[in-house]
Amino acid sequence: MAGQLPSNGPLRSFLARVVSRVGRSKQETMKDFLYNSSRYPQLGLMTHDTYGMDTEFMKEVRSRLPKNLAAEREIRISRALLLDAKQQVLPREEWMTRDKDVPYLLPYIEMVDKEFKEKQYYQKKIYKPFYKIQNLL
């Protein structure tokens, strides 16, 4: 049922008006609606700003960010924490939009993922047989 409007109610009429005015697909309109109804764009955060950074994997990803991206990320998170503590949101024109929300961590996630998989592969192929030999002696 992806891409279909709800069968009845105010949400359907609202989305129908928006689609008729803008001329975009129902699916794109629904994506915008759901994106803007979540809290983090209202605080100026990008989707990747909300990723947890407490795992070894994500700590490695964060360590590989260029200084300018890391600084921008920290500024966005600090501002969001301050706004959330005050129980406020940014003015509508400062909200993060889907167009501006780029997956800036993706290349670093892919790079670290590839390295972690290689590490696991070599640990499985090289180190396990070595430990088996050590245990036999």
Image (tube, grey):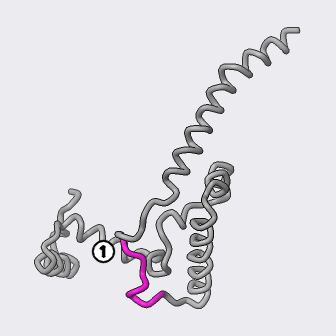
Q: Seen from this angle, which residue lies furthest right?
A: 137
- The part of the chain drawn in magenta is 90-98
Residue shown at 45% from the left, 81% from the top: 42
Task: Find residue 77 and report its image quarter.
Answer: bottom right
Task: Find residue 1 and report its image quarter.
Answer: bottom left
Residue 121 image position (x, y, % from top left): 62, 27
Predominant SS of the magenta segment: loop
Depicted 109 relative to depicted 80: above or below:
above
Residue 19 image position (x, y, % from top left): 15, 75
Q: How dense is the environment of label 1, judged by Cα within 10 Å: few (below 14), some, or many (20 and up)?
A: few
- Residue wearing tag 1: 33
Q: Seen from this angle, which residue lies furthest top?
A: 137
Depicted 80 relative to depicted 68: above or below:
below
Q: Amino acid at mark 1?
A: Phe
Task: Find residue 16 and report its image quarter.
Answer: bottom left
Residue 8 image position (x, y, % from top left): 16, 74
Depicted 10 relative to depicted 101: above or below:
below
On-image quarter of the C terminus:
top right
Specify whether residue 97 is painted magenta: yes
Depicted 5 relative to depicted 115: above or below:
below
Q: Nearer the viewer, residue 128 or 108?
A: 108
Q: Nearer the viewer, residue 124 or 16?
A: 124
Specify whether residue 53 is painted magenta: no
Q: How many marks?
A: 1
Residue shown at 18% from the left, 63% from the top: 4
Q: Secondary structure at mark 1?
A: helix
Residue shown at 26% from the left, 69% from the top: 30
Residue 81 image position (x, y, % from top left): 61, 80
Left or right of residue 96: residue 121: right
Left or right of residue 2: residue 124: right
